[in-house]
Image (cartoon, grey):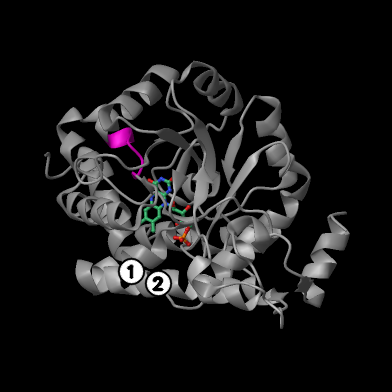
Amino acid sequence: MPKQDAQIQRKVEHLFLAEKYFTDESYADFDSVRLLHNALPELSFNNIDLSTQFINQKMSLPIYFNAITGGSKQSTKFNTELAKLAHKLDIPVSSGSMGVFLRLPETKASFTTLRENDPDGFVIANVSAKANASQAQQAVDALSANALQIHLNAIQELAMPEGDQEFFWLDNIKQIVAKLTVPVIVKEVGFGLSRNNLEDLYKIGVKYVDISGFGGTDFAQIESSRNHELDLTYLDQFSLSTVESLLESIPYQEKMTIFASGGVRTPMDVIKAIRLGASAVGMSGLVLHHLQKYSLSETEIFFTEFVKQLKLIMAAIGAKSIQDIKKAPILFDENLVNYAKQRHII
Ligand code: FNR
């Protein structure tokens, strides 16, 4: 692996800076949403079913490990651990952007460890919106991936000193969706998608979207910290929180499958995101934090407990299945009602 490669160096800095800025607090607006409990749950705790259809495969849980890394020695370690954990939990796991693999094929092993350590699992490849269809297929083939994520990261690119300045992506995404052999998920990287974005994506044939809203990992902050000349953190002010973005997605939830991520910290956040329309809920910052700060077995204990809490909350709201969560009574605080009114959502 080339030692001084700038793209690889940037990926290493992302890991370090994500941990530096990680906090247990979430700004994703989950606190502005309230679920009401059911005093007559009429269910048996042990029969609560957490299984979920993830695109075209039945998985045990409604959560997944979202895109993080690849390319470096450090990322080989994290991808190996993520895949081992995803395998144990029977949840999907995504690779970080494979642009570096497309440019430097010698970095392949840092990505393929995902498939090696989760041989029958749901593994997702990840490329940028400027990759062409044949590069996207190459990324999928390298991992024998079950799906591809295309990331939209305009704010991140703008905050990077060496970032892209050309943002003509829709035609390219359309080509990839039409040509690829696996389903394609279009995702943000933590700034959210508006319903105008969802309309644009729907029109070009995109069926799966991860709104990845604001509230957790903040790439305006991370890239500003790498850019020693300018603080461009203010760019995150344009973002939609994960909850706001889920509200934006309501008119599209029948026509597209909506995944949610961004600032998911607790089992309650997961249940609220599902109640607001998410088909499954992704986490990057939280799992990466645990793997950086604790051992793999401690991280496994954390997520085993996390799953138990999911069941406990489902019992409290009277939900026997993931579908039942969508029927739970819900309330929004004034700020969210204000947002929804101004955006003509309610
Ligand atoms: C990311 N994320 C990301 N997303 C993507 O599509 N391709 C990528 O290569 C990366 N790289 C990456 C590196 C690191 C260190 C982190 C923490 C995250 C974004 C990620 O998938 C997700 O959309 C956001 O991080 C928001 O979720 P969390 O972190 O708040 O749970």
Return the x and y of residue 63 as percentages of the image width and height: 47, 57
Q: In front here: 24 or 89?
A: 89
Task: Indicate yes or no whether the magenta region holds residue 96.
Answer: yes
Measuring 83% from the left and 69% from the top, which residue is drawn there?
337
Q: Picture coordinates of residue 137 (x, y %)?
A: 37, 22
Reading the image, the residue beneath label 2 is 22
231 relative to 110 in the view: left or right: right
Report which quarter residue 205 is drawn in: top right
The disc label shown at residue 289, or none: 1
Note whether residue 241 is visible: no
Type of amino acid at the residue the image marks with label 2: Phe
Mark 1 or mark 2: which comes first in sequence? 2
Q: Is residue 156 left or right of residue 34?
A: left
* Residue 25 colored in magenta in the image: no
Instruction: Measure how far apart labels 1 and 2 are at the Cα level.
Output: 7 Å
Q: Are there few (<14), some (14-19), or many (20+) residues within 10 Å of tag 1? A: many
x and y percentages locating residue 55 in the rendered image:
52, 38
Mark 1 vs mark 2, foreground winner is 1
Residue 55 is left or right of residue 243, and the answer is left
Residue 330 is drawn in which quadrant?
A: bottom right
Which secondary structure type mostly characterizes the magenta part of the structure? loop
Where does the magenta region start and end? 95-100
Q: Are marks 1 and 2 in contact (CB under 8 Å)?
A: yes
Q: Secondary structure at mark 1?
A: helix
Q: Give the answer, above or below, for where 160 lies relative to 286.
A: above
